[in-house]
Image (cartoon, grey):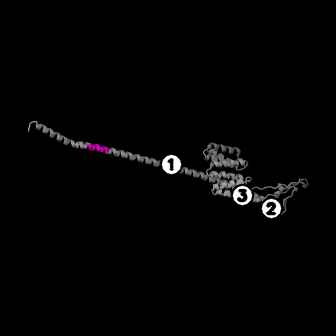
Amino acid sequence: MTSHSLPMRGAVVALSIAWLLALPARAALFDDEEARKRIDTTNQRLSQVQRQLEDRIAALESQLKSQGLVELFGQVEQIKSDIARLRGQIEVLTYEQEQAQKRQRDLYIDLDSRLRKLEGGPGATVPSAGAGAGPAASLGLPPASAPAASVAPTPAPSVATPAGGAAVAGRPGATAPDTASEQRAYDAALDQFKGGTYGAAIASFASFVKSYPKSPLAPSAQYWIGNAQFAQKEYRAAIVSQRQLIAAFPESQKVPDALLNIATSQFEMGDGAASRRTLEELIAKHPQSEAAAKARQRLAIR
């Protein structure tokens, strides 16, 4: 073995030993990098899951909030519908009370007239033409103290009674059937309104107005058409119907109520300015009406 081979063999051995010693360090280095990669991957997945959870929670919160608003809106609409129904029932009760008072007065007049005829008192018989009969005589009241010869012969006038059903003087019972049929038709339509069948009530009241345009109940029938349309939330149609009432029956006692219904319909449509103008018109034209008092209250809180 030469002297040069020994140092070379030592160098090879040294390199081998160094290489063997470097293997664990290199393996440890590779293990650390792999662990870091796995940790980063896990962190990314955790972040992604966290974002998904946050998105789902936000969506659920938004859904809950929207459902709460929908429920609240539904409750408000139900309250409005109940108020409209109650308002209609109050109007019905008020009208029925007025009609009951009228019927009582008409019944009293009819009974008084019949009793006078049975007793043979003044106005017991229907005066003929030329007897100087006037409205007082036809109602069973004592005639004016004037000489019979000084009275010019005139036909006996007939006095139509209100819608209570009293007979027309000079023609007993002539208008009773017509009045009774009007009242039955009107009551049937009103019963439909009370029962909440607003579509049928609108059709019945419209038929009544068409069949009895000169009836004293025609303005009320037209008013209930608009009121039923309001209950169905057909606010534009309600305004048109109430304006038809005002145009066709300008002297009717239902005109103030029609104006109030128009103002309410305008308010429900979101036109607060038009509603305020209508309320002011109502107060200016009908200051003593109950509707005007309600209008003042509404203007005070707006």
User: What number of labels is visible?
Assistant: 3
Say if the magenta span includes residue 23.
no
Q: Position of residue 238 (x, y in %)?
A: 65, 49
Which image quarter is the C terminus in?
top right
Q: As drawn, which residue projects farthest toward the right?
A: 149
Q: Earlier in the sequence, mark 3 or mark 1?
A: 1
The residue shown at (25%, 43%) is 28
Residue 291 appears in view: no
Q: Main secondary structure of the magenta part?
A: helix
The residue shown at (50%, 48%) is 66
Residue hosting label 1: 66
- The dot on residue 183 is 3
Q: Nearer the viewer, residue 199 or 146?
A: 199
Figure quadrant of residue 162: bottom right
Figure quadrant of residue 197: bottom right
Label 1 Cα crowd, 10 Å radius (few <14 / some 14-19 / many 20+): few
Figure quadrant of residue 97: bottom right
Q: CA distance from mark 3 to mark 2?
A: 23 Å
Residue hosting label 2: 114
Identify the secondary structure beneath mark 1: helix
Q: Which residues are magenta?
A: 30-37
Q: Earlier in the sequence, mark 2 or mark 1?
A: 1
Q: Is residue 223 left or right of residue 10?
A: right
